[in-house]
Amino acid sequence: MDQVEMLQPLFDRPVRSVEYLAPGHSDHASDVWRVRTDVENVVVRASRAIRLEGPFALGCHRLFGADPRRVWDLEALNAMLAELSPVPAPRVLRRGWLGRRPCVVVECIPGRTVDTFIGAPGGVLCDLGRALAHIHRRSRAGYGDGAGRVRRPLKAFHPHVAETIAALATASHVERPPFWSAVVDRARALPPPAAGCLVMPDLDPTQFLQLEGRLTGLVDTEFFCVGPRELDFVALEYLLDGAGAGVFRRAYAQVLPPPTLGPVREVYRLLYRLLEVQGRVPLRRWMAQPALFE
């Protein structure tokens, strides 16, 4: 079955063209197509996962209860993000099936994928700072998945992080250097986060679209979760340089005071490394990344 034949049942009018939108990496959560008919120019998203596999999906499911196979949850999640953020998530137009896979048809937002935040136009970094601040501003009393199916008390978060670190390390057979035990012990001893909010465990430039030096859309939202906003800041220390971090921070501070990362940085960095958000970077080099948000 070719792509047009596969996607046609989602549309009342004949499908005129189909373009598969490859994300640039092999472990993406969804298959994504841009589809045109005589009356629509839209994007179709369908979960690729039959079962949860790999350190990122398994770790996010263990810690937050996130499950990208529930693609219909994007309808409410994207509507919430569009309400919160000046950089919108695409509106879900309708839900459907591709064979046995649930899928959604979403509006097509103009722009091209952001390749990197390093050297990005100031407008892109300002938009990023304001968007995340607006998303973070709506606090929640627990942590869990973005759809609200799973919600746990914040007092359990850091012990749960320690358990997740141990489980991921065992599953991936990661070598444990001398500092390992101290970081895990610190995770167990950390006080609860002050609040939860929507965060992106897989925060990456490729989740955003840009046009003429400004962000136009936040398009990959399957793994949004509820957790401490410090998680996003720790992730950004691997995605920005010093100058970019300054632009981002100033824009964020126009909406919300930035958090303090010192008490949680090492713990959250170790968690992110085991989730392999940016691949299998050598652990010592990963932990030695410059601290951009002091």
Image (cartoon, grey):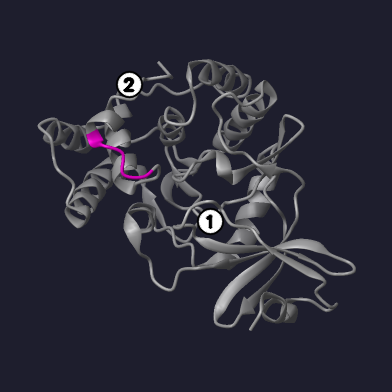
Marking on residue 262: 2
- Expressed as whole percent of the image width and height from the top left, the position of residue 50 reads 43, 73
Q: To which quarter of the image does residue 5 belong? A: bottom right
Which stretch did the figure color magenta?
Answer: 279-283
Residue appearing at x 61%, y 31% in the figure:
128
Which x, y percent locates residue 292? 42, 19
Q: Main secondary structure of the magenta part?
A: loop
For the C terminus, give its image quadrant: top left
Residue 264 in percent (x, y) is at 31, 29
Judge the density around disc 2: few (<14), some (14-19), many (≥20) Cα neighbours within 10 Å: few
Q: Earlier in the sequence, mark 2 or mark 1?
A: 1
* Amino acid tagged 2: Gly
Tag 2's secondary structure? Answer: loop
Q: Is residue 62 in view?
A: no
Residue that numbered label 1 is attached to? 222
Q: Specify the quadrant of the image occupied by residue 9.
A: bottom right
